[in-house]
Amino acid sequence: MFAQLSVFALLAIQACTVSAFPAYQSLAGLSRDELDSIVPTLRFTPPPPPPGPLANDSSKLVHDAAHPYEPLKDGDQRGPCPALNTLASHGYLPRNGIVTPVQLVNAVQEGFNLENSFARFLVYSTFLVNGNPITNLMSIGAATPLTGPNPPAPATVAGLNTHNNCEGDTSMTRADAYFGDNHSFNETRFQTLVKFSNMFGNGKYNYTVAARLREFLVQDSIANNPQFTLVSPRLFTAFAESVFPINFFIDGRDKSGQLDLDVARSFFQNMTFPPNFHRRDGAVSNVGQDVVTDYFNFTPGYNAKGVNTFVVDPTSATLDQPCVRYTNFVNGLIKSLYPNPTGVLREALNINLQYLYEATVAAGDGCTQVFPYGH
Ligand code: HEM
Ligand SMILES: *[C@@H]1O[C@H](CO)[C@@H](O)[C@H](O)[C@H]1NC(C)=O
Ligand SMILES: *[C@@H]1O[C@H](CO)[C@@H](O)[C@H](O)[C@H]1NC(C)=O
Ligand SMILES: *[C@@H]1O[C@H](CO)[C@@H](O)[C@H](O)[C@H]1NC(C)=O
Ligand SMILES: *[C@@H]1O[C@H](CO)[C@@H](O)[C@H](O)[C@H]1NC(C)=O
Ligand SMILES: *[C@@H]1O[C@H](CO)[C@@H](O)[C@H](O)[C@H]1NC(C)=O
């Protein structure tokens, strides 16, 4: 099923022959000489390009007989994203939550009708930070040995739960990392979503509610989380995720734009498509986000010295600067995780960076490509 398994097979053999080198241990503990001898021997399969758009993006039944919900088994990974959790629990992604970028793009398109260029940017940016570039695997939850031996620190390869890469503060149903568990469903926060839906949406979650709730969540974190931060790249996902439930969790046969709260709970908490769920009709991305930003004009920043000490971060991209986002992401975040990659690691990073850049081209952003590791 996974071409990448060859890497594991090889490492498993090495783990037995090379003394005490557990298959999942970080390669970081090894000397330069040891690294130079091991890394080039990994049978590296260059990651295939991402799929294009769906041939047919009409609405259709996705909670079908071929994709039944199955409860979690021991060791299965689930994390902060209700959509990916649901896709894994229904078999659109591997049910253990260990996934490749191609599987992710296919699953979010097939299951939810997420637009292709948006899906690709989300997937490759997340993968470059939280996935294992050599084995081409990522956990949609916590770090796990199943993604293979880690590249050397400071690379994290810790799955989607990793704080401050894509996971971040002001989630609707997950607490800020400062308060402990940053990825499990949190009933208190869901009840805030319910309260706002009752106040501004007549008991449904819609764009009007999304705008009010987004403002509240930011102000709440500024007032209560001494380590609050909301800057690029998390800034972009926080605002997009506010409208995602409206765009993707409403059944495709319902054009009202009003999300029922039991349906919301089914995704956020139970990781389940409602019975008979049809995906939305036609691919979209973050349509409706302008309703949120028109209402709540936020400048990226953080609490500098404890609660209520918000300062603007002038180095962060703002929501209307996709190319600053792209350039800082590559030259800042990725370079900090992989300061000086060599061999197949460098090759793998460059291929994934190429796929990331191509997503910005497909989105029509007009960014200039940057090459932190040469051509
Ligand atoms: C149609 C596709 C998708 C939908 C509908 C969706 C929906 C959401 C929503 C609503 C949240 C916010 C949860 C909350 O605030 O309580 C979220 C969080 C998240 N999603 Fe997705 N998502 C999609 C695709 C993806 C993809 C492709 C990735 C990356 C591969 C991703 C990664 C994440 C991460 C890391 C978070 C955590 C943010 C946080 O809580 O700090 N999502 N997603
Ligand atoms: C697209 O898919 C829908 C739903 O499955 C189907 O009814 C329709 O015939 C398909 N259209 C084409 C052109 O294949
Ligand atoms: C749930 O979220 C609330 C509000 O952010 C927080 O105070 C609480 O500690 C969280 N609960 C858990 C179990 O993480
Ligand atoms: C996020 O949650 C995970 C799992 O509970 C924890 O290991 C990690 O330390 C948390 N991140 C932060 C920054 O607190
Ligand atoms: C949200 O619901 C409220 C209450 O029904 C309504 O006044 C408002 O127009 C709705 N907003 C949208 C964008 O549907
Ligand atoms: C969530 O799952 C529980 C336990 O299976 C079930 O009782 C409940 O009805 C489900 N809720 C929704 C909204 O899907």
Image: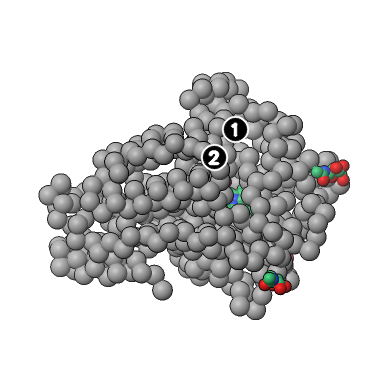
Mark 2 surroundings: few (<14), some (14-19) or many (≥20) residues within 10 A: some
Q: Quadrant of the N terminus?
A: bottom left
Q: Quadrant of residue 46?
A: bottom left
Number of numbered discs visible in the structure rendering: 2
Q: Quadrant of residue 68?
A: bottom right
Q: Position of residue 228 (x, y in %)?
A: 55, 31
Q: Which residue is mark 1?
A: 320
Disc 1 marks a residue whose amino acid type is Asp
Q: Position of residue 249 (x, y in %)?
A: 70, 57
Disc 2 marks a residue whose amino acid type is Asp
Q: Position of residue 128 (x, y in %)?
A: 41, 48
What residue sits 60% from the left and 26% below the top? 299
Q: Is mark 1 within 8 Å of ligand 1?
A: no
**Which of the two marks, 1 or 2, is nearer to us in this view?**
2
Can the viewer see residue 114?
yes
Closest to the observer, 335 or 148: 335
- As helix, strand or loop, the secondary structure at mark 2 comes to loop
Q: Quadrant of residue 209?
A: top right
Return the mark for residue 242: none
What residue sits 19% from the left and 66% below the top? 14
Can the viewer see residue 230?
no
Q: Which residue is mark 2?
A: 365
Q: Are marks 1 and 2 in contact (CB under 8 Å)?
A: no
